[in-house]
């Protein structure tokens, strides 16, 4: 079963909290702190690729959604996020969720990819 949208938000919050730079000060801000409907239909604020807005969820191939790809590597001439790290793809990366669960970076990426592949369900 895919993760829920709330779990995705918690992952992204924890990644942002662990980052070397404050995501609140980035051009895209904490774009995931919105409603489910706005998230799946929206664009990443203030980001463009080849002159076009960047959808949060890629409508053609959700597994290629920019926010997921950029956590793994650079994307569309943008550096891997969070800028300056630490990176989810680092071998020793992990976060601790509110319930005390420790989740590795590889599990985060796997869960996000599975969520996208499942059609980005709100409730998993």
Image (tube, rainbow, N blue to C red):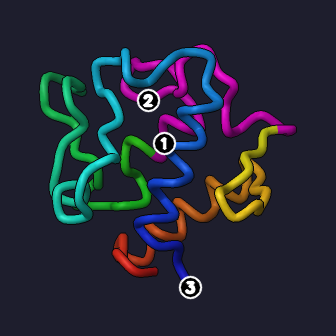
Task: Tell me, yes or no, whether the highlighted magenta stretch contains residue 89.
Answer: yes
Q: Quadrant of residue 20?
A: top right
Relative to 31, does residue 99 appear above or below in the rendering? below
Secondary structure mostly taken by the magenta-highlighted segment of the chain: loop
Numbered tag placed on residue 1 in the rendering: 3
Q: Earlier in the sequence, mark 1 or mark 2?
A: 1
Q: Residue at x 38, y 23 (%)?
A: 24
Residue at image location 40% in from the left, 80% down from the top: 123
The mark closer to the camera, 3 or 1, is 3
Residue that mark 1 sits on: 69
On the image, the x and y values in percent for residue 113 come to 53, 61
Report the quarter where the N terminus lies: bottom right
Q: CA distance from mark 2 to mark 3?
A: 28 Å
Q: In this figure, which residue is indicated by the disc labeled 2?
A: 75
Left-right relation of 48 to 119: left
- Pointer 3 and pointer 1: residues touching (CB < 8 Å)? no
Residue at (35% x, 35% y) in the render = 30
Q: Picture quarter containing residue 36?
A: bottom left
Whether the residues at callouts 1 and 2 have beta carbons within 8 Å, the answer is: yes
The disc label shown at residue 121, or none = none
Q: Nearer the viewer, mark 2 or mark 3?
A: 3
Asked whether 20 falls inside the magenta stretch, the response is: no
Which percent across, then down, holds residue 55? 22, 45
Residue that appears at 55% across and 38% down? 71
Q: Nearer the viewer, residue 60 or 39?
A: 39
Q: Secondary structure at mark 3?
A: loop
Residues in magenta, as a range: 68-92
Q: Earlier in the sequence, mark 2 or mark 3?
A: 3
């Amino acid at each position: 079963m895919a993760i829920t949208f709330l779990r995705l938000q918690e992952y992204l919050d924890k990644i942002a909290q662990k980052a070397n730079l404050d995501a609140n000060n980035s051009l895209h801000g904490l774009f995931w702190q919105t409603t489910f409907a706005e998230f799946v239909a929206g664009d990443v604020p203030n980001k463009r690729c080849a002159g076009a807005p960047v959808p949060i969820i890629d409508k053609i191939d959700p597994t290629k959604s920019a926010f997921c790809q950029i956590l793994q590597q650079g994307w569309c001439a943008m550096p891997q996020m969070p800028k300056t790290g630490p990176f989810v793809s680092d071998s020793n990366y992990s976060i601790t969720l509110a319930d005390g669960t420790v989740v590795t970076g590889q599990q985060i990426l796997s869960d996000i990819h599975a969520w996208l592949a499942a059609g980005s369900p709100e409730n998993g």
